[in-house]
Amino acid sequence: MLHETEMGGFFQRQLAVYVEYHRDPRNTAMHVVGILLLFTGAVLPLTLVKLPLFGFNVSLAVVLAVPVLIYWLLLDAALGLGILAVSIVLFSVATTIAAQVGTATMWAIFATLVVLGLAAQAIGHKVFEGREASLFTFPSHLLLGPMFVMAKLFIALGFRRDLAAILAPLPANSLSTR
């Protein structure tokens, strides 16, 4: 297992590559919306499947999310905790929706959330970045999106100046070819 400093360095290197596809603040905003919709949509049907675990019924959504949440915590504990907090809220939202609607409606909501989430990200890349999503070149970026969004939030709140230079938007007069 990597030490925290090695994981932190690994995370910062991964983030530096990821941010090259996500420099435009409007694309970042589209990613916030897209990631929240995609996460909620993805866990929605999984909240209906309950597994007995340590004397409790735990949803399959939580069981499948735990390894990814652990990975995020290992990459950066503070950002991982932020994602964990948001995940708890989104799990609760998905569980409430699934419990309140019928199966057909739940699947319709699932499809709508996933389509809107993907559309937000595709529009962000095509319209605001002018390039395809990094996910097609680097599949591991699927796991970096939430970390990127949480890092941007922490920076906006005045935290994580160590990541601010990596995630800074390009100046308006930049000659970048994106």
Image (cartoon, rainbow, N blue to C red):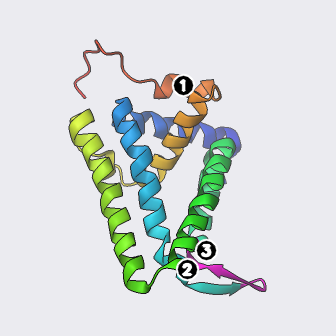
Q: Which residue is mark 3?
A: 63
Mark 1, residue position: 164
Q: Nearer the viewer, mark 3 or mark 2?
A: 2
Q: Is residue 52 magenta?
A: no
Circle 3: residue type: Val
Q: Earlier in the sequence, mark 2 or mark 1?
A: 2
* Amino acid found under the numbered disc labelled 2: Ala
Q: Is residue 96 visible?
A: yes
Secondary element at tag 3: helix
- Does 155 appear above or below 76? above
Q: Of residues 112 and 82, which is closer to you in this image?
A: 112
Residue 54's image quarter? bottom right
Residue 1 position, x and y percent, is 67, 54
Front one among 93 and 88? 93
Identify whether 68 is placed above or below 57: above
Question: For the residue marked with disc 1, what is the amino acid?
Answer: Ala
